[in-house]
Image: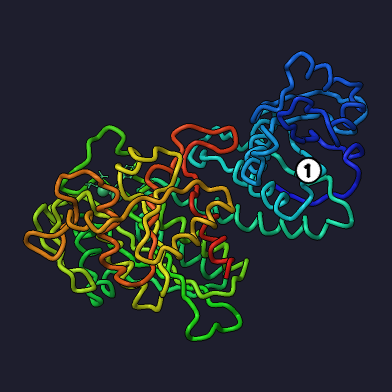
Amino acid sequence: MQITLETKPYATLETGALVSYVFEDANPIQGTLAEIDKSVNNLLSKLSAGAEFTGKPLEMTLIHAPAGLKATRLLLVGAGKREKFDVAVLRKIAGAALRYLKSRSVKQLAFLVRENDLNEDSAQAIAEGVITADFETDKYKSDKKNDKSIDTILIAGYSDQNKSAGEKGLTRGRIIAEAQNFARDLVNEPSNKLTPKILAEKAEAMAKESGLAVDILDEKRIADLKMGALLSVAQGGPEPPRMIVVTYTPATPPKPSAPVIGLVGKAVTFDTGGISIKPADGMEKMKYDMAGGATMLGVMRALAALKPNVKVICVVPSTENMPGGKAQKPGDIQTAMSGKTIEVLNTDAEGRLILADGVHYAKQLGATHLVDAATLTGAIVVALANINVGVFGGSDQSWTDKLLASAKAVGEKMWQMPMDDEYREFIKGSFADIQNIGSGKGGGSITGAWFIREFAGDTPWIHLDIAGTAWNDDAKPWLAKGPTGVALRTLVNLAMSY
Ligand code: BES
Ligand code: ZN
Ligand code: ZN
């Protein structure tokens, strides 16, 4: 799919479909739309009078052979109220338009940006919208949806004055969306095609292609470093674990006192629950239990191209969680790399175990500001459904605020959860320093977060629970069913803010 910025007048563009958007307003036909209305002999006015053309969010109005345009079709997408319009809405509009036209076997489209939106951010949002919308999860289907494809996209409406802003946005949007699709592709892989070893190989290949430093710790080095928490999960099955480390260093070396971001992602390539085994119904979804790791690797891929002015270390502990004969059992006591002892009361609370060693190792490698992302708890799905990412912060609220500001800027919904000291009591161990589940008092996502926080210590830290948001159970008009790549855009924005 080729995307270019086009400054020729939209009416002269010979394309499969000219796409634009319409606001929900008493009179939706204003500005450029009034112009277009004239060129289609006031058809829009007529539709609008009959309430068929209202601008309601994602309403689709397709007009064939629009008289005064060179395009074969005109597609107008509802944008909702002008006051609520932002890059997140524009991204969805562009994505929904692509999927709508692709399903109708259209090959090219031109997306006309409205008169008030001709800036860098709009071009970025459109590029992100169409590239993420184009991703299909039909890799293993013989009869592919992808046989229908949009080949060329023009982003139109820009002039010589704002062309370079548009092109900058387009380039940035392309980098971010391709990184997001890279992460989604990893998440989409079933566990027989993506073991910890294979994930590590893919991470290594990505890092080498992107010019990032990479270090893959195999089971021997993991054992030498005494990463007992990660090893305890891995011992349940024959696939060896990996600790994946990818590092971005800016070209001009930052001062020694400068912050170093540590991104730690849970990558359980399949979570059966271990001896505390999960019910069969729906277990197939647990191939996405490596989405946190995939997101972090995707972030690194984007940062390699966007080149922020901050060092970023990405640490991805990866293993399966299997109930084999050598598996750890409830009540087992493990010693994490940090030296803390953990009573494993439930082997299905394995994400926090591998993150314990991941977070500790990231600190040892020099990270001063941590973010972890993990499909950690079913409880976050109860609390926030598939709408918001659960955000858990440590004592440094300014670090959490910085991430929340990034989330807002890129239009990813995130919600901060409480981390009162009282919750910490829930994981106090009876027979070891801490236990890996709370003692039956609810607040399951918070106790999970507190467990990880024990290993972050005083280092500014944020935990993102993406269990509810990393996977779309149903296709959206702008996104295929399956992996979403959530949190990637926020974390890229966060790193770019340095
Ligand atoms: N991978 C799961 C969490 C999960 C649940 C992800 C649903 C996506 C959808 C995690 O390892 C897990 O099993 N957590 C347990 C923790 C419990 C034993 C304290 C859970 O949420 O049930
Ligand atoms: Zn689990
Ligand atoms: Zn898990």
Residue that extends furthest to the top in the rendered view of this protein: 50
- Picture residue at 29% right of the left edge, 38% below the top: 283
Look at mark 1 in the image and give the residue it sits on.
113
Would residue 182 appear left or right of 372 to someone viewing this image? Answer: right
Would residue 244 appear left or right of 477 to someone viewing this image? Answer: left
The amino acid sitting under disc 1 is Val
Choose between 387 and 110: the one closer to the eye. Answer: 387
Choose between 396 and 466: the one closer to the eye. Answer: 396
Would residue 431 appear left or right of 443 to someone viewing this image? Answer: left
- Picture residue at 72% right of the left edge, 49% below the top: 122
- Picture residue at 52% right of the left edge, 33% below the top: 475
User: Up-down: is 172 above or below 150?
Assistant: below
Tell me if residue 149 can be seen: no
Residue 210 at x, y percent in the picture: 57, 68
Residue 422 at x, y percent in the picture: 22, 55
Identify the secondary structure beneath mark 1.
loop
Q: Quadrant of residue 9?
A: top right
Residue 264 at x, y percent in the picture: 39, 64
User: Up-down: is 110 above or below 342?
Assistant: above
